[in-house]
Image (spheres, rainbow, N blue to C red):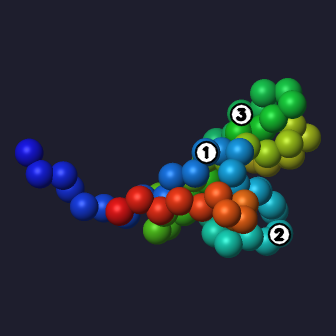
Amino acid sequence: MPRRKSAHLRDPPEHLVVSKSEGKWQGQSAISHDWGADTVVYLDHPVLKQLVARAPGDFEIASGDVVHASPLSGKEHRFT
């Protein structure tokens, strides 16, 4: 069976920096999980679909909030 060609951006959550004010990609927080030391944010983006990022535990975010994410330098990988 032939493989489908599609472009995906796959970075582990710890390779993304999350901000409420600036970043390479802007989207909306779909869900966030407070795990104490970390907060895991699921970010809906119109082109990239969904990004998962790990933020500090005190990062306060609600579903629907605007969130920005950027890859750490040298850690961005694009698979096609």
Q: Position of residue 80 (x, y in %)?
A: 35, 62
State the mark number for residue 33.
3
Q: Which mark is residue 21?
A: 2
- What amino acid type should be assigned to the residue bearing mark 2? Ser
Q: Which residue is mark 1?
A: 12
SS assignment at label 2: loop
Amino acid at the residue labelled 3: His
Real-space Cα separation, disc 1 to disc 3, in angstroms = 16 Å
Q: Vertical placement of 38 versus 43: above or below?
A: above
Q: How far apart are the two marked residues, 2 and 3, measured between alpha carbons?
A: 20 Å
Query: In terms of sequence position, does the residue under pointer 1 or pointer 3 come before the other?
Result: 1
Q: Residue at x 51, y 52 (%)?
A: 10
Q: Is residue 71 above or below residue 54?
A: below
Instruction: Look at the numbered disc 3 and give the secondary structure of its residue.
Output: strand
Asked if marks 1 and 2 touch (Cβ < 8 Å), the reply is no
Q: Is residue 47 left or right of residue 28?
A: left
> What crowding class fits label 3: few (fewer than 14 Cα within 10 Å), some (14-19), or many (20 or more)?
few
